[in-house]
Amino acid sequence: MTAIACAALLSVLCTGTVLPTFAIKYTYETKYVDVPVDHFSFASNLTFPLRYLVNATHWRKHEGKPIFFYTGNEGDIEMFAQNTGFVWEIAPEFRALIVFAEHRYYGRSLPFGNKSYSEPKYLGFLTSEQALADYVLLISHLQRDQDHPSPVIAFGGSYGGMLAAYFRMKYPHVVAGAIAASAPIFQFSGLTPCEAFYRIVTSDYNSTSTECAASIRRSWTEINNITSSDAGKSWLSTTWKLCKPLKTSNDVKELKSWLSDVYTNLAMINYPYPTNFLAPVPANPISVMCTHLPNSSLTGKLLLKSIFKAITIYFNYTGSTRCLNIETEASTNLGDLGWDFQACTEMVMPMCSDGHNDMFEMQMWNFAKYSDTCYKKWKVRPDEKRALRMYGGKDISTATNIVFSNGLLDPWSSGGVLYNISSSTAAVIIPEGAHHLDLRESNPADPFSVRTARKFHRKFIRRWLHNHQLSEPTLGVGL
Amino acid sequence: MTAIACAALLSVLCTGTVLPTFAIKYTYETKYVDVPVDHFSFASNLTFPLRYLVNATHWRKHEGKPIFFYTGNEGDIEMFAQNTGFVWEIAPEFRALIVFAEHRYYGRSLPFGNKSYSEPKYLGFLTSEQALADYVLLISHLQRDQDHPSPVIAFGGSYGGMLAAYFRMKYPHVVAGAIAASAPIFQFSGLTPCEAFYRIVTSDYNSTSTECAASIRRSWTEINNITSSDAGKSWLSTTWKLCKPLKTSNDVKELKSWLSDVYTNLAMINYPYPTNFLAPVPANPISVMCTHLPNSSLTGKLLLKSIFKAITIYFNYTGSTRCLNIETEASTNLGDLGWDFQACTEMVMPMCSDGHNDMFEMQMWNFAKYSDTCYKKWKVRPDEKRALRMYGGKDISTATNIVFSNGLLDPWSSGGVLYNISSSTAAVIIPEGAHHLDLRESNPADPFSVRTARKFHRKFIRRWLHNHQLSEPTLGVGL
């Protein structure tokens, strides 16, 4: 996977790291609900069990208290449950049911078991529309014995945030409001310049240390130079402790792709306290990493040794990794595979870099090539305009009851909604926030802006629930 | 098909008449656009040509003038084009493009050709969601070389009106507003009492002549009595000039079902001038029919002879029909077949009659039986709650820019939206109107209320177009 292809993914699991283990802090029951493989046809009546996690500790079900519903995205839902502390923290005050729904084709929600990823006839039902329809059905299942169904608030981060927003847009009768954190719904063709994403990544490094960003920018040439000989490949493989030594130019390309992903991921998880979301990393990981790159005048092997020290904080912060493996993603991490397919069908998010205004190698956005790669890999071709047709692109003026929050450290804010759409669909900016920091549990190191954002979320949720109560369909006319 | 099953259909072609011929008044080009068989999966990449009719005579394409888009419903789109004069009449004043899009699986838009109706694996893609997605794609095709795409106003009557409303609800970025005429979006389970529909039919007859309604109510018993003997069956077959003489009790059941449909259809097309929509009928056909039923004290053969005279105005107003054929619908009219499948999957609209508050035989709404009949016929089972999950039932408070118009003579107004939803989603009542009279061309015999309704439509369309212009997505924030 090239750097571009991978960064074009919204996958939080995009690098070649093994699936992170996560601390189990929040507890829940694991349940399954049968859903149709295809919600939009009657051509077959196949169903499969969709996993969801549920905690009813605080729910006042018969008092009409709400359901807090996380619209699962591209990964094991348990990981999202453990990394979305905000929902757990506010549930008691709202007496809410907590539900984390797994996205089809991820985690344990595989429609065709082991065959799910084998060919388009099985994998083809991996779409956002089908996932939303799963959630509609799950919610009707949760409300099945309620005379007055509990209102639902959707929560999601990243692609999950896009789903939360789309959920409210497409099914406003199901979802009273949505907190869409770091949801890059404007990252599609023609809406956002393709270079915006990597410029934000670069800015994160630059603002930490211009020496750091400059060192990284220079490193690509040094890698290219040194790996132009077999001896150089060998030296780099040994010095960087690669599990699989570099043999071909393609190996080098993959290494660079992996590196780009590491820099990008660190920008996404540049949280002010140690986390274990994508990988175990220290607080403010970019700052820590950049301490190893204080001098951009270094060249050759000296620079590359520094780069290795720098990236160690991402791939081996715990010190337990024996060698650097850049190849694990496609084989062990189903999440990546699934998102790769989604990026090859409906989630086409153009990315590019110029090596000048950003710290990456120059890479053009080439849709034809992208499409060919997709076809080779999945036997499908991406539909560049599909997401615009389905969800409206920037034309979302009729959306109601959505909060779009974005941290400005987060490269995905390039495709985020950064302005208010209406009085009920608002943008929240978190200048010091990385990727959906606001959905994480509160922490003493949290910047003021994220505390304020969470207060804003709570205020909006309260308002939506209040308005929902006033507009009970049984009263006849809504609004 | 039982009376209930047929009346449960929104099909305007529900009776056993042959497909009506219609006068060709409006002209257009016939075109096709390739659309995917399944918009919501990538499991296959099959496509098929969807037919649409287009007239660009008045369109000022490069001045951003609108597209008037009829969301085709269950039948040959040419028939709807010829019976929707309102759109043709107002297009010049708006400089609009006129498009009539055919609904998949009807007319000439058969995804799998002759096999389309053969089994669920072919027929299963006949759903409203797929049809709407067809329309989205067609519109993007129509706008393909426009820098500033023309705004789209959707029009539809009956099921087409439901589609027009759903289109705006689900794809507000595609459709600036919708005129949804006689759209019974509240006709689903739990939203409307099942007896409402036949009570309105009855009321149409009662208000014309109580003798007439009473005669019809009495006739069922007389038919049952006389057909209890073979001689009686023979007498009725001869007297009513049935193409196929009555042999079994099931034949009698089907005759009664056909009769119910005739009474129902006449209520739908009870227009103030002669029409040829479902069948050639005179102006105010219920009045004309009821002149043959002036005396409800008639019994036995005398009553049945009168009934025959009465129904002649429906099945043989032109005098060219040799015999009364109650069986043609399933074999010659694909429109009926398709709607029957839709009613057996997502469009479950409960109907019942009690023979007391209405003029029909008692017939309970029995979902289990209905489901079994569907399974026997189509190998699918209806999903009673599906339409509610997908489209929200009565919870449509967030809908914007829709006019729901209903004629109170129209039995389908039982499931119509008769109250304003918001300032931009309004109800228009046409007390003297039958089924989507407002969408028909203007006529000197039109009641004042329908003239007013059409003015209202025009006013709303003008407002939507004006607001659309103000909220061009290129300006950044909508609203």
Image: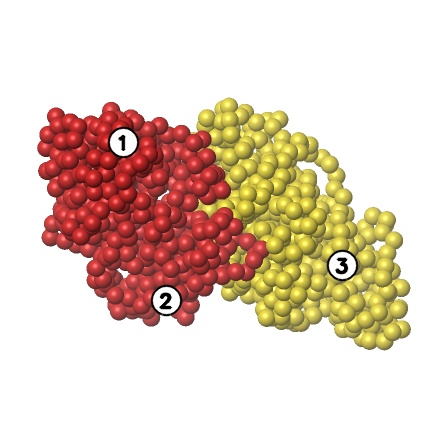
Chain colours: A red, B yellow
What residue is drawn where x is 44% and y is 48%? A127
Disc 3: which chain?
B
Q: Nearer the viewer, residue A281 or B119?
A: A281
Provide the secondary structure element on which disc 2 rests: strand
Are discs 3 and 2 both within one chain? no
Of the numbered discs 2 and 1, the one sitting upstream in the chain is: 2
Q: CA distance from mark 2 to mark 1?
A: 54 Å
Amino acid on which the number 2 mark rests in the picture: Lys
Q: Nearer the viewer, residue A17 or B40?
A: A17
User: Badge 1 local density, few (<14 within 10 Å), some, or many (20+)?
Assistant: few
- Residue pointed to by mark 3: B290
The disc placed on residue A29 is none
Residue B268 in the image: state x and y as whole percent. 66, 53
**Nearer mark to the viewer, of 3 and 1:** 1
Amino acid on which the number 3 mark rests in the picture: Cys
- Residue pointed to by mark 1: A230
- Does the CB distance between marks 3 and 2 fall below 8 Å? no
The disc placed on residue A31 is 2
Image quarter of residue B364: bottom right
Amino acid on which the number 1 mark rests in the picture: Asp
Q: Nearer the viewer, residue B112 or A170?
A: B112
Residue B147 as seen in the image, left or right of residue A106: right
What residue is drawn where x is 57% and y is 27%? B59
